[in-house]
Amino acid sequence: MVGIRGRGGHRRAGRLLVVLGAVTALGLTACGSDDDTAPKPWPSGADDHPKVQAAPKPSAKIAFQPAAGAQNVNPAAPARVTVADGKIESLTLTNPAGKKVIGKLSPDATSWTVGEPLGFSKKYTWSGTAVGADGERKEIAGAFTTVTPDYLVDASINTGDGKTYGVAMPIAVTFDSAVGDKAAAERAMVVRTSVPVQGAWAWLDDRRAHWRPKTYWPAGTSVTVNLNLYGVSYGDGVFGADDMTSHFTIGRNQVVKANAKTHRVLVYRGGKLIQNFPASMGLDSDPGRVTNSGTHVVMSKHETYKMTNPKYKYFNVEVPWAVRISNNGEFIHGYGPSVWAQGNTNVSHGCVNLSPDNAKVYFDEALVGDPVEVTGTDKQLDPADGDYYDWAIPWAQWVGMSAAG
């Protein structure tokens, strides 16, 4: 207790206590604040601040593609499981026989995607677990069923893996039945080239789609064709049966120019003339024997070939070094009996006749896919002349024959 000294020198503690008591009675502290609202000291030994309660961590959220229980699923469509707020711990997809489907887990373990084609008319079952951010496990369980097709359509392609073709070679895809949704089929057919090449698909009819460049292929181009047709819906319950690929190379640039008026066959390699052969072409006075003008394409080669034409009464006439340039019976081949006319007169039944020796020289140099540009007649190559009349169609018209635009 602090004493207050009075006039007489005596301490007057009693009076101080009275004064303090009066202050307290008025409800004031010594600093003049309201007692009820003044900050209270934190209890001795407690933390400096109160703790905030942490939010609970979420559980795993599982999503299926296609949805669990889905029916009539396209087997070529993506199939996966994804997990939000968690990770996949284990997962399998099995077919009706219990065989596991190949798939891949993402690096962050939040998705698993099917990595192989599924089958038609099958039920597939998911089984596994996921662990959420809350540490709790959840079961991954579900199933879906793929569509049952009414009919499957097969396709074939004219180019072979590892083959080398000439600069006019078209890519020809032939379906074994009419295709309803041509645009869907066309979008699934992809052509990739090692150098930029402008080209387009065109439908010659309901079963045949060809791809060709706007101008001849650049020499040395590597070409890969992916026909991703498996599972493509062509409409009315009809689907593509299989995928297919083809990788080939374009060889040197060789162009043959055959002129029915000059009776010559000129062979150009890389733009330079390398051969100049006398020739005899189709008889001008008979429309059934005239050689067609237009750009033909070498289709096949035969060391010997037997020619038959009942209309003109010849059967199994064997000729050497025959190079087919259309499906209407036109060849470049050797023929000894017409050597007298080669270089001056057209006497054949539509083929381009060379001497056997010259035919052998040309045969050895020819590649399937080489262009043979015939001029000098009043009859033009057209769709009636077989599979490879692609170059007889002007580019603007060709592009208009695409189904996908």
Image: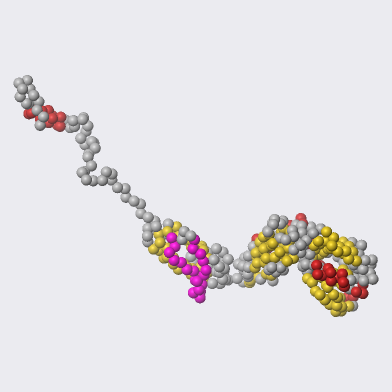
Instruction: Identify the residue shown where x is 71% and y is 60%.
Output: 221
Quarter-of-image position of residue 121: bottom right
Horizontal side, residue 152 vs residue 292: left or right: left
> The N terminus is located in which quarter?
top left
Quarter-of-image position of residue 269: bottom right
> The C terminus is located in which quarter?
bottom right
As drawn, the residue found furthest toward the top would be 7
Which span is picked out in magenta?
Answer: 87-106
The image position of residue 310, as x and y in percent, is: 87, 77
The image position of residue 119, as x and y in percent, is: 56, 71
Instruction: Identify the residue shown where x is 92% and y is 74%.
Output: 337
Residue 242 in view of the camera: yes
The image position of residue 369, as x and y in percent, is: 77, 65
Horizontal side, residue 262 vs residue 214: left or right: right
Let me know if residue 100 is in the magenta part. Answer: yes
Horizontal side, residue 380 vs residue 56: left or right: right
Using the image as rendered, state which of residue 211 and residue 281 is in the foreground: 281
State how many labels appear. Answer: 0
Residue 183 in view of the camera: no
> How was the colour assigned to the protein in this rendering?
secondary structure
Instruction: Identify the residue shown where x is 94% and y is 67%.
Output: 345
The image position of residue 51, as x and y in percent, is: 29, 47
Instruction: Identify the residue shown where x is 88% and y is 75%.
Output: 311
